[in-house]
Image (tube, rainbow, N blue to C red):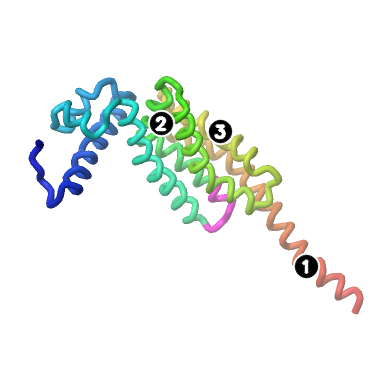
Amino acid sequence: MPKISAATVVEHRAQQERLILDAAHAILEETGDVTSMREVAERAGLARSSVYHYFDSREALLNALVQDVFPKWTERVTNAMAAEPELSERIIAYAVTNVQLVQEGAHAVGAALAALSPGEALNEQATQMHRAIQEPLIETLAELGVRDPEGLGELINSVVHASTRLLESGRQPEQVYAGLTAVIRPMAREMQAQMDQEIKDYETGPRSLQGDRS
C-alpha cells in the first residue's frame, strides 16, 4: 500500500489524482498528446501502477482531464463576458477569450480527446462541453433579440475556430486577434445598435401618441 502523505485517505487520493492530472495536462500542452501512461507516471513522480490505480486507461484519464479543464474554461469565458457592460462587447470577449485559452494550451485536452476512437460516452461528453461553452454566447445573442441565437452562435464559433487554426498554424497572435475582432466587432455593434433603436422606439412611441392626442 502506498505511503499516505495527507491527513486522510480521501485527501491522499485527491492529491495523487491532482498530481496525475497536472502531469498529463503539462504533457498535452507540450506535445499535443498523451501517448502513454508510463510517461504520465514519470512526470508525476509515481509508479505506473499507481496511475492505473486511479485511471484504468488513457481514455479514462483524458475524460477526467476534460472534466477538470472545461469547467474552468467556461468560467473564464463567462467572467470575461460579465466584465463587459455592453452586450456587443460580451460577444467580442467570448470570441477573444476562447482563442486566448487555445493559445494558453487548454484546447489540447479537447484535441486529444477528439483524436480517440469515437464512442457513445465520448460523443456525449463532447456535446455537453460544446453546449456549456456556447451557452453564455447564446444567452447574450438572445438578449440582443437575435431570431436564431443558436444558429448565429454556430457562425460566430466557426470564426473562433478558424482563428484558432490560424494560431496553431503559426500565425502571429496579434494578427489573429486583429482579424478576429475585425470580423466579430462590426456585427456585434450592429446588433447592439438595432436593439438600442428598438428599445428607444418602444419607449418613445406610446408617449408620442399620447402627446398627439392631448
Count of number-bearing discs: 3
Which x, y percent locates residue 66? 37, 36
Which x, y percent locates residue 164? 46, 30
What's the amino acid at mark 1? Thr
Please give the residue where the numbered disc 2 appears in the rendered image: 110
Q: Is residue 87 magenta?
A: yes
Neighbour tally class for label 3: few under 14, some 14-19, many 20 plus, Cα within 10 Å: some
Please give the residue where the numbered disc 3 appears in the rendered image: 159
Quadrant in the picture for the C terminus: bottom right
Neighbour tally class for label 1: few under 14, some 14-19, many 20 plus, Cα within 10 Å: few
Please give the residue where the numbered disc 1 appears in the rendered image: 204
Q: CA distance from mark 1 to mark 3?
A: 37 Å
Local secondary structure at mark 1: helix
Q: Is residue 65 above or below residue 80?
A: above
* Region rendered in magenta: 85-91
Which x, y percent locates residue 7? 12, 52
User: Nearer the N terminus, badge 1 or badge 3?
Assistant: 3
In the rendered structure, are the residues bearing label 2 and label 3 in contact, judged by CB atoms less than 8 Å apart?
Answer: no
What's the amino acid at mark 3? Val
Residue 206 relative to residue 185: left or right: right
> Is 46 or 32 nearer to us in this picture?
46
Q: In the displayed orientation, state which residue is furthest to the right.
A: 213
Q: Nearer the viewer, mark 2 or mark 3?
A: 2
